[in-house]
Image: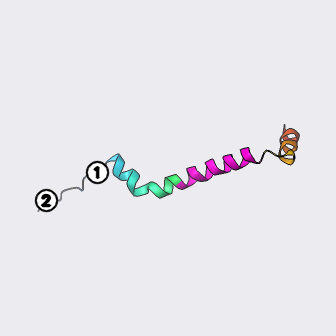
Amino acid sequence: MTDIPPPRPTPSQLLRATRPWWIVPIVLILLAGLALALADSAPLRSLTYSVM
């Protein structure tokens, strides 16, 4: 008997297999950016001016 190597997964199969793990961090980063953009309040502005 000869050992036949398993076929290599296609890129779409790899994305389908790992979908939750690469979408969650991207969504969290986007939500954090959106929250910071919407929370444009005076304390945050004063903090950015003090850092600059």
Q: Quadrant of residue 49?
A: top right
- Of the numbered discs 2 and 1, the one sitting upstream in the chain is 2
Q: Quadrant of the C terminus?
A: top right
Query: Left or right of 10: which side holds 48?
Result: right
Name the residue type under label 1.
Arg
Say which of marks 2 and 1 sits in front.
1
Which label number is shown at residue 2?
A: 2
The residue carrying pointer 2 sits among few (fewer than 14), some (14 to 19) or many (20 or more) residues within 10 Å by Cα, namely few
Name the residue type under label 2.
Thr
Which label number is shown at residue 45?
A: none
Q: How many marks?
A: 2
Residue 35: say if magenta: yes
Query: Left or right of 10: which side holds 46?
Result: right
Query: Left or right of 9: which side holds 52?
Result: right
Q: Secondary structure at mark 2?
A: loop
Image spot of residue 51 (x, y percent): 85, 41
Task: Tell me the residue at 51%/52% (across/down).
Answer: 23
Task: Tell me the residue at 37%/52% (across/down).
Answer: 14
Q: Is residue 18 above or below residue 38?
A: below
Write down the residue under mark 1: 8
Span highlighted in magenta in the image: 24-39
Q: Secondary structure at mark 1?
A: loop
| CA–CA distance in space, label 2 to label 1 | 18 Å
The residue carrying pointer 1 sits among few (fewer than 14), some (14 to 19) or many (20 or more) residues within 10 Å by Cα, namely few
Q: Could you say which is closer to the camera, residue 18 or residue 8?
A: 18
Query: Left or right of 26: which side holds 14?
Result: left
Task: Tell me the residue at 39%/54% (across/down).
Answer: 16
Image spot of residue 8 (x, y percent): 28, 51
